[in-house]
Image (spheres, rainbow, N blue to C red):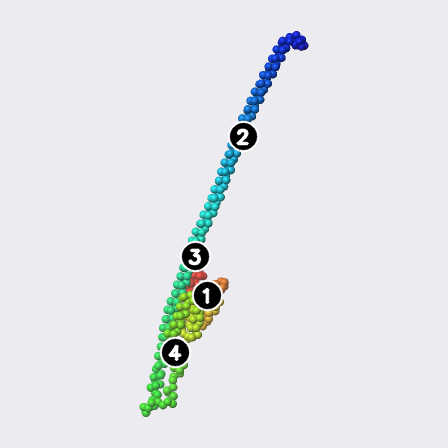
Amino acid sequence: MQLVRLIPSDRATIRHFYFVMKAGAAALAMAGISIAHAGVFDDEEARKQILQLRAQVSETQRAIDQRVAELEAQARNRSIIDLFNQVETLKTEFARLRGQIEVLQNEMENTQKRQRDLYVDLDGRLRKMEAAMAEQAAHAVQAPAAAPSVAVLGSSAQPGTGAPPTANDPSRAMPPAVASLPPAIDPVAEQRAYDQGLEHFRAGRFGEAVTTFQLFTRNFPRSTLVPSAQYWIGNSLYAVRDFRGAIATQRQLLTQFPDSAKASDALLNIASAQGELGDLQGSRATMQEVVAKYPTSEAGVKAKQRLGIR
């Protein structure tokens, strides 16, 4: 109430107070402007820093993405390189295995050739032994037959006359043993025909070998080489994978010539053919028969090895 009373009485004071208040308001306004300007300046700096940080983050993100892409590319390249190395390793291993297979095939072919040569050589030796035995037997048969013929010729003269015997003399008849002798066989032609079959077999011409040996058995049925020829027929049929024909041929050999030197080999060949036909039980039984009948023969030794017998 006192203030109200003073204001109308002192106008100068009021004007002064007014100007002071106005100046204070102006100062306050200026201060507010300064504060607002300062605030605006701080926001600009913050905004700039935020933009800089965003730019840095973006740059860092781009760098990280680029690095990740490089690492992925390196990983892919490394995977491709590893895969390529594995492929090259497999190629090398395949080439090595193929070389080993070729070596084994070559060794197998050489082994088969050596076996054929061994069979042929063994057959040649047996042939010579059989021929020598046959010749000795022939000489043993001819020696006793020669004495009676001399006696008959010596007694053909008529006693006391010294005259030669007449044509009707029964003593001049040919002895029955001489008359029943089979026709002579050319041993050279026989051997040549047999060797021709062996040459075909040795050269791997098994079909021609079969034909040649079959012709040999027809042309020389009484030859001591017929069992061997029969064996080589069966062996040739086995070589051309006619296993049933090989079995039949070798069984015919065993039936006709059970005491032949080829009997053990023929029986082993039957066992091999049975195994090729899938008759494992029959093949095992046949090999056991080889071991039982011919334990010390080469075929018996092979049969023991196949059976796992020591």
The label nearer to you, 3 versus 2, is 2
The alpha-carbon separation of the residues under discs 2 and 1 comes to 91 Å
Q: In which quarter of the image is the N terminus?
A: top right
Mark identifier at residue 101:
3
Whole-percent x, y for residue 50 in the image = 54, 29
Marks 3 and 2 in Cβ contact (< 8 Å): no
Mark identifier at residue 51:
2
Residue type of the residue flagged with mark 4: Ala
The label nearer to you, 3 versus 4, is 3
Q: Nearer the viewer, residue 125 or 20?
A: 20
Give the residue at x 64% y 9%: 11
The label nearer to you, 2 versus 1, is 2
Give the residue at x 43% y 71%: 212
Name which of mark 3 and mark 2 comes first in the sequence.
2
Residue type of the residue flagged with mark 1: Val
Q: Within 10 Å of the Cα at label 1, are there few (<14), some (14-19), or many (20+) other Cα atoms?
A: few
Q: Residue furthest top?
A: 9
Whole-percent x, y for residue 96 in the image = 42, 53
The alpha-carbon separation of the residues under discs 2 and 4 comes to 126 Å
Query: Label 1 belongs to which residue?
Result: 240
The alpha-carbon separation of the residues under discs 3 and 2 comes to 73 Å
Q: Is mark 4 on a helix, strand or loop?
A: loop
